[in-house]
Image: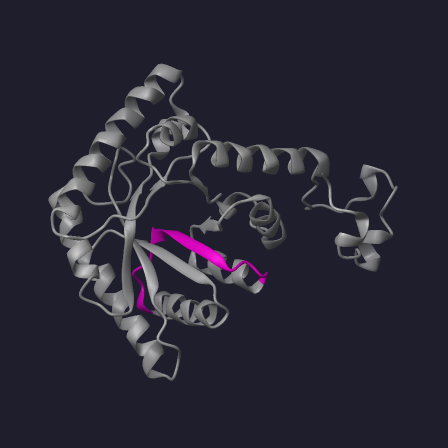
C-alpha cells in the first residue's frame, strides 16, 4: 500500500513548478524515475530477501542517491553498500544510518575520514562497516580509529569484513589460511570487530547461461564454507557472509551460506 500523500515531504518550489510539464522541460543531466516502477521493484526485492531469510543491502553506487537509499531501507533493506569513502560520507549526510564500504581503503587520509564517519554514526546509533584484505589495511584502519578516539571521540567500533577472492580476481585474499590470519589480526584491536566474510563474485553476474552462473557460485560457496570452517576452528564466530549481485542473487540466497545480498 502506498503511503498517503501527506507522508511525503513537499517538493521544493522549483520542482513543484515542473509538475505536469512535458519531458522537454527537464534540464539535463537529471535522474528521471518512474516512481511506480521503482516502488514496485523496491517491494519485490525486499519480499525476495524476506522469503529467503537473508538481509538485503543494495549497492548505492548504482544510484548515488541518499533519498533512494532511504526508500530502500524503508522497504526492508538493512542499509546500503558503497564503494568509496566519499560515497559513504554522502549517504550519511543524506540521513542513511547503516553503511558498508564494501571495498578496501588503505590511504591514511581517507581512513581518517572513515574513522570520523564511524564516530559520527556511533553518536547517532548508526553503523559503519568496511572490507579488508591485508594486514597493512587492518593496521592502518586500527590506527585511524584509535586516533579518532584520542581526539575526544566516542569509543566507536567499526565492523570489519575479511574479503576472500571467490573468482572476481580483483580484491580479497585466498580462501583459507590467509583469511584466518586477517580475522585473528582484526581481533587484536579494540576499535575493530570481526563481522564476517565478504565473498563477492562480480564476474558471475555476467556469465551468459544459468548453468555457468550456478557452477561459479557453487565454487564460491565451497570457498566460503572452507574458510568459515577454518576461522571458526580458531574459536572466532563468522556471524555473516555478505556478497551476491543482481545476476546471481537467487543462487546465493538459496545456498544457506550467504546471509546478506548486495
Residue at horizontal 24 percent and vertical 39 percent from the top: 165
Residue at horizontal 15 percent and vertical 49 percent from the top: 180
Instruction: Find residue 172 and report its horizontal and vertical position in percent.
Output: 25, 45
Image: 167 above or below 163: above
Is residue 1 or residue 261 the one in the foreground?
Answer: 1
Image: 213 above or below 3: above
Q: Is residue 149 magenta?
A: no
Q: Quadrant of the C terminus?
A: top left
Instruction: Find residue 158 and report its horizontal and vertical position in percent.
Output: 34, 63
Instruction: Find residue 78 and report its horizontal and vertical position in percent.
Output: 49, 49
- Determine the image quadrant of residue 225: top left
Image: 160 above or below 255: below
Q: How is the image coloured?
A: one colour
- Determine the image quadrant of residue 159: bottom left
Horizontal relation, residue 135 to residue 50: left or right: left
Residue at horizontal 67 percent and vertical 44 percent from the top: 31
For the record, the magenta segment spans: 94-108
Amino acid at each position: 500500500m502506498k503511503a498517503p500523500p501527506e507522508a511525503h515531504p513537499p517538493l521544493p518550489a522549483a520542482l513543484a513548478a515542473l509538475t505536469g510539464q512535458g519531458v522537454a522541460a527537464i534540464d539535463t543531466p537529471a535522474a528521471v524515475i518512474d516512481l511506480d516502477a521503482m516502488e514496485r521493484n523496491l517491494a519485490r526485492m525486499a519480499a525476495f530477501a524476506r522469503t529467503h531469510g537473508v538481509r538485503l543491502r543494495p549497492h548505492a553506487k548504482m544510484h548515488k542517491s541518499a533519498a533512494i537509499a532511504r526508500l530502500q531501507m524503508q522497504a526492508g533493506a538493512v542499509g546500503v553498500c558503497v564503494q568509496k569513502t566519499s560515497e559513504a560520507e554522502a549517504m550519511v549526510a543524506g540521513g542513511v544510518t547503516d553503511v558498508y564500504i564494501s571495498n578496501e581503503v588503505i590511504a591514511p587520509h581517507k581512513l581518517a575520514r572513515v574513522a570520523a564517519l564511524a564516530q559520527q554514526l556511533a553518536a547517532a546509533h548508526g553503523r559503519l562497516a568496511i572490507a579488508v584484505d591485508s594486514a597493512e589495511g587492518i593496521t592502518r584502519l586500527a590506527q585511524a580509529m584509535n586516533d579518532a578516539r584520542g581526539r575526544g571521540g566516542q569509543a566507536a567500533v567499526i565492523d570489519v569484513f575479511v574479503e576472500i577472492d571467490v573468482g572476481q580476481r580483483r580484491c580479497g585474499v585466498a580462501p583459507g589460511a590467509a583469511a584466518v590470519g586477517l580475522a585473528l589480526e582484526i581481533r587484536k584491536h579494540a576499535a575493530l570487530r570481526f563481522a564476517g566474510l565478504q565473498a563477492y563474485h562480480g564476474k558471475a553476474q555476467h556469465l551468459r547461461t544459468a548453468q555457468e552462473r550456478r557452477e561459479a557460485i557453487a565454487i564460491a560457496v565451497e570457498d566460503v564454507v572452507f574458510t568459515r570452517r577454518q576461522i571458526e576452528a580458531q574459536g572466532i564466530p563468522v556471524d555473516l557472509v555478505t556478497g551476491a549481485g543482481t545476476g546471481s542473487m537467487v543462487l546465493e540466497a538459496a545456498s544457506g551460506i550467504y546471509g546478506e545480498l548486495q
